[in-house]
Amino acid sequence: MDKKIEGKKSIKGTIEVPGDKSMSHRAVILGSIAQGTSTVSGLARSRDVQSTIQAMQKAGISIYEKYGKAVIEGKGITGFEKRKKAAPLEIDCGNSGTTARLLIGLFSGAGFPARFIGDASLMKRPMDRVVDPISKIGVQITSNKGYLPIEIWGGAPAPFDYTIPVASAQLKTACLFAALFIGGSSVVNEIRETRDHTERMLVLMDADIKTRNTLQGKSIIISGRRELAPLDITIPRDISSAVFFIAAALVCPSSEILLKNVLLNPTRAHILEVFKRMGGNIEVELIDELPELHGNVRVRSSSLKGTVVGGVEIPLLIDEIPALAAAACFAKGETAVRGAQELRVKESDRISGIVDMVRGFGSKIKELDDGFVITGKTKPDKGRSVPAKFKSFGDHRLAMAASILALNVRGTSMIHDAECVDVSFPGYFDELEKHTAE
């Protein structure tokens, strides 16, 4: 699907984006191994989350919708692992790296025989960061040289003490999920803070989990074989989806939007702090702290200035960098992103994709091995006589980031392969069109 976008528009109104994708994955998985029935309101309807739901259903979990809520009939720790004596399952993770990495950890801990595959894009994404630690704790696991397909044959996993070598919430969660099935205490150490939805959700479910700050970072101590209480939660709306509307409202003239019930977890909402230091007019109204901090976010058109992003900030806004890049094209001066080499192994090589996007719309960008430098205020529409065209590379976040630039280019722009937005935000372009005006 190709999507046409008319430029020189403002964006206005009250917007409700889908439920948070990261929390949705975890709620489905943890609800499946809880002892009893979990109910989840606001579950994301994205294609990625559907991959996780289908995987758990294939593993024998009943998941259905009732009165607008997702109902998950959990089997408990001991009930779930009974499946380990059956024939191996083939789990198709689609495009979802989260589904693959989290379930590899879960099935490994449970000794659940399975073979993991995915679509053409996912089959090219590295999985060795999960396979390596799992293979060292007594699990029989093989991979295709660090890539899918990955096969789990069983084993007898033992308690472990593991330091995560890269800042990855998916790897951290895979290890924690494995530890839930292992008798005794396991420790997961992270040097750089990453999103902490898993730890927070496990606390809500009465898991035996403790977090300790250390000189090196943070240690998470978890004791396995403890049955989890079921969930009854409403998932806040996804900040990583909201950020595209936030960036558009900041750079499109005469814009003002209100985003309702957005997740404000500090390990996810750091992009708001970055936009504020760039001069963004952003107001936050806190609503509640459970199941996680969330509230309303009001955004108005602003005169932005460049900034530098790197170091400990990168894991806290890795998914928001494409939107940041689009906004940076309209900020005065340079915006530099460094230390973001993780972008090279997302759904696409996002650094290369961002460079292609920014240059395609007429702005100046320098590619780095681990990021980029954008020189803003170059008026992307100046002198352009034909519509801008951008190939999304099948990457949902690049397609949505391109729409921000397209709104500021005079004339009609085209985003190719735009259907990829369904991975995280089905109906994104309809929502965008509904809230744009001359």
Image: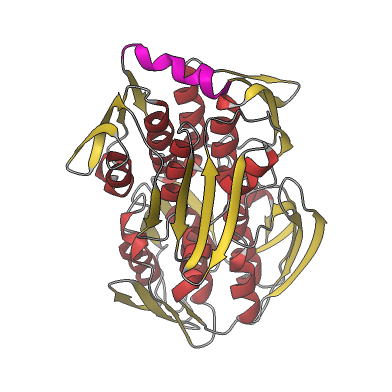
- The answer to whether any part of residue 193 appears in the image is no
| Residue at x-position 44% and y-position 46% | 418
Out of 436 and 35, give the one closest to the viewer. Answer: 35
| 78 in the magenta segment | yes
Residue extent of the magenta highlight:
76-87
| Residue at x-position 59% and y-position 74% | 274
86 left or right of 47 in image: left
| Residue at x-position 45% and y-position 33% | 182
The part of the image, by quadrant, that contains residue 87 is top left
Q: Quadrant of the N terminus?
A: top left
| 239 in the magenta segment | no
Q: Quadrant of the C terminus?
A: bottom right
Q: Position of residue 288 (x, y in %)?
A: 81, 52
Q: Position of residue 33 (x, y in %)?
A: 56, 26
Q: Is residue 72 above or below residue 304?
A: above
Q: Is residue 136 above or below residue 365?
A: above
73 left or right of 104 in image: right
Decide whether the magenta segment is chiefly helix, strand or loop.
helix
Q: Is residue 221 above or below residue 6?
A: above
Q: Position of residue 336 (x, y in %)?
A: 43, 80
Q: Position of residue 133 (x, y in %)?
A: 32, 46
1 left or right of 427 in image: left
- The answer to whether any part of residue 314 appears in the image is yes
The part of the image, by quadrant, that contains residue 27 is top right
Out of 243 and 194, give the one closest to the viewer. Answer: 194
